[in-house]
Image (tube, helix red, strand yellow):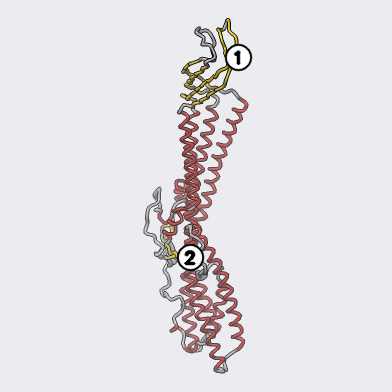
Amino acid sequence: MTHVLPSSTNRFPDASLMSSKLNRVLVIFAYALVSLLYWLPGNAAATPTTAETTEVVSVSSAQAIDRALAGHPTLRAGDADIDAMKARLLAAWGVYVPKIDFTTLFTVMPAVRGDPFNGFTDYDDWGPFVRVDVAADSPIYAFGQLEALRDAARAGIDLSRAKRAIAQAELVYQVRRAYCDLQLAEEVKAVLLDGKKYLERARKRLETMEEEDDPQYDQIEMLKLRVFEADVQERVFSVERDLSRAEHMLRQSMGLGVDVAVRITERDLSPYAFVVAESAQYMALALQSRPEIAALNAKDAVAQSEVDLQLARFFPTLKVIGNYRLAYSPVADDQLSPFASDSYNVHTVGVSLGLSWTFDLGQQLGRYHEALAKQEKAHQDREAEILKLQMDIENATADVKIQAQLIEIQASALRAARGWLIAKSDLYDTGFATLDDVQDALVEYYKRKIGHYQAISTFNLAVLKLSRVVGADVTEYVPGTTGGAPSQNRMDSPKIESR
């Protein structure tokens, strides 16, 4: 199906549609405008201006996204988390670097004279004593412990990258949503500005009739108009506040200060044009592209590495062990016999192979079964997320298709309302219609005008939601492929296809 915008580009009916007999229609239009304002939701109005703003930044949608991604604190935090996980991987590889313990002892001691069979301690003679110990060991084989540590570190890096991708996807989604809201606001802004012109003309018309003592002047209509003007202004303030929040969201996402006003350059509100795929195709794409799925895959890998590590710790670790000792004291006699134990004058070096084995079956079994339980939880969390994702994609896809149909319905209703207004205006000129008939046509025309814009905006928001759920830009996805590919779909195209 296709959407064709109304042939008339005027936001309001041409003045030629109304003859001079319709001067009082201005007053009726004032009432119609108030009715329309009460019908409108409070999320659209003229772009507010703040007295404190000192700078105006005009951006396209792509520029807003680039600014947001350039240095948002959430993304910088994600980068730091990735660096931390890379450091853990470096530490996991570092286990092959020998661990060296260096100990130095310096003190004073009484003299030790003689040999092991005929020796004594001379407390009248004191001197220094120094000892240096160097111990080193490096693992050679640990029955999978070292590999499990490295696998866990790699999975941790993948998890950190997935978390950063989640933050980036959410940031882009919020920027595009805010931009779409501002586009709708620009369209509604034009309607309100034109409508306020008619409101002002109605007031001037009544004032002129009062000054000229026109017999058709009705003071009640002037009183009603003043009340309506207050209601309109109150409504404008309300919707300006809501719009200010949308602008604040866009400004905050872009990392701009509160003294900067954001203006959008892509003001034309047109529906995205693309081929809507089936939910099963989007599901296959989401399993590859959605960062939340990547994060759960990484968590599953971390849990598997923990199981492997706890299992490997039941086995010993084969190490190369080296030691060196140097001890010396000038007040201790050096023992010449190799069988004599001399701890005061020593110089030894040794290298050996050794096994490091810890037996703590109670704790080891507990940690192993805990790791198994966490692995099962990680696996089931992934399966639960996939089930939820399937439902979310089906709902989002159905929402896009429904909103696409509503655009066509609103466009058809707008054309019908415009024809209705023209017909009633012509009939009133010839005396075959009442002012109430014209008023009803006016209210319906402007309601459908804004309703059409809102239908387009709601459709675009549904497309953005679907893209966020899938984890890829669905407007650039070609059904039947495994990944995204550019398609001829820009916001300035009014065509929407659905299959």
Q: Is 154 situated above or below 135?
A: below
Q: Residue at x 47, y 73 (%)?
A: 190
Q: Residue at x 48, y 22 (%)?
A: 319
Q: Mark 1, mark 2: which one is toward the viewer?
A: 1
Q: Residues within 10 Å of mark 2 (few under 14, many from 20)?
A: many
Going by the numbered disc 1, the residue's amino acid type is Asp
Q: Is 93 situated above or below 457?
A: above
- Could you tell me which quadrant the C terminus lies in? bottom left
Q: Is 83 situated above or below 192?
A: above
Label 2: element kind = strand
Q: Is residue 270 visible?
A: no
In this view of the protein, which residue sits in the foreground, 403 or 32?
A: 32
Going by the numbered disc 2, the residue's amino acid type is Ala
Estimate the x, y position of residue 252 in percent, counting from the top left: 51, 59
What mark, if any, has residue 261 been given in the picture? 2
Estimate the x, y position of residue 59 in percent, counting from the top left: 43, 62
Q: Is residue 140 visible?
A: yes
- Could you tell me which quadrant the N terminus lies in? bottom left
| Residue of label 1 | 124
